[in-house]
Image (spheres, grey):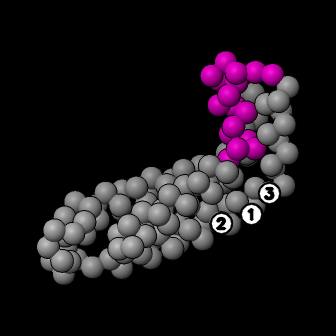
Amino acid sequence: MTKNKSSLHTLMAGLAAGIAASLCCLGPLVLVMLGVGGAWVSKLSVLEPYRPYFLAVALIFLFLAYRQIYKAPAAAACEPGSLCALPHTNRIYKWLLWLVAAFIGFSMVFPYFASLFY
């Protein structure tokens, strides 16, 4: 597995952990806004005790992705024809990293503002 591919996998794992961390609070709100209702939506609050663990895993993966993306070799140092030889690849990964970081940050603070939406 190449370094760029492993950084993408680490970044996606951080995103998945961030989504799991927000299921207890953001999940019911999104479902209600989409018109989905029912008693089972309230069962998503069962995940609330696990939220700190999901956030910790998300931050760990985010840190690992940050380290891999910013320590990636320059495009000139890569083998010609490989993914890292394309100069826009690192820009896209950096953009995705900060997008995922913003999502995880939103997941961390959303429970404090959730009462404004209900």
Q: Specify few, some or many for label 3: CA neighbours under 10 Å numbering under 14, 14-19, or 20 or more.
A: few
Q: Are marks 1 and 3 in contact (CB under 8 Å)?
A: yes
Residue 54, compared with residue 30, is above or below; it is: below
Which amino acid type is shown beneath numbered disc 1?
Tyr
Q: Quadrant of residue 68?
A: bottom left
**Residue 67 picture location, percent across and down:** 44, 76
**Residue 92 picture location, percent across and down:** 31, 57
Q: Secondary structure at mark 1?
A: helix
Q: Specify few, some or many for label 1: CA neighbours under 10 Å numbering under 14, 14-19, or 20 or more.
A: few
Residue drawn at 67 percent across, 51 percent down: 20
Q: Secondary structure at mark 2?
A: helix
Residue denoted by label 2: 57
The verdict on residue 23 being magenta is yes
In-front residue for pair 100/20: 20
Q: Which mark is residue 53?
A: 1
Which amino acid type is shown beneath numbered disc 2?
Val
Residue denoted by label 3: 50
> Horizontal placement of 45 versus 34: left or right?
right
Q: Are marks 2 and 1 in contact (CB under 8 Å)?
A: yes
Can residue 3 be seen here? The reply is: yes
What are the residue bounds of the magenta stretch?
22-38
In-front residue for pair 47/115: 47
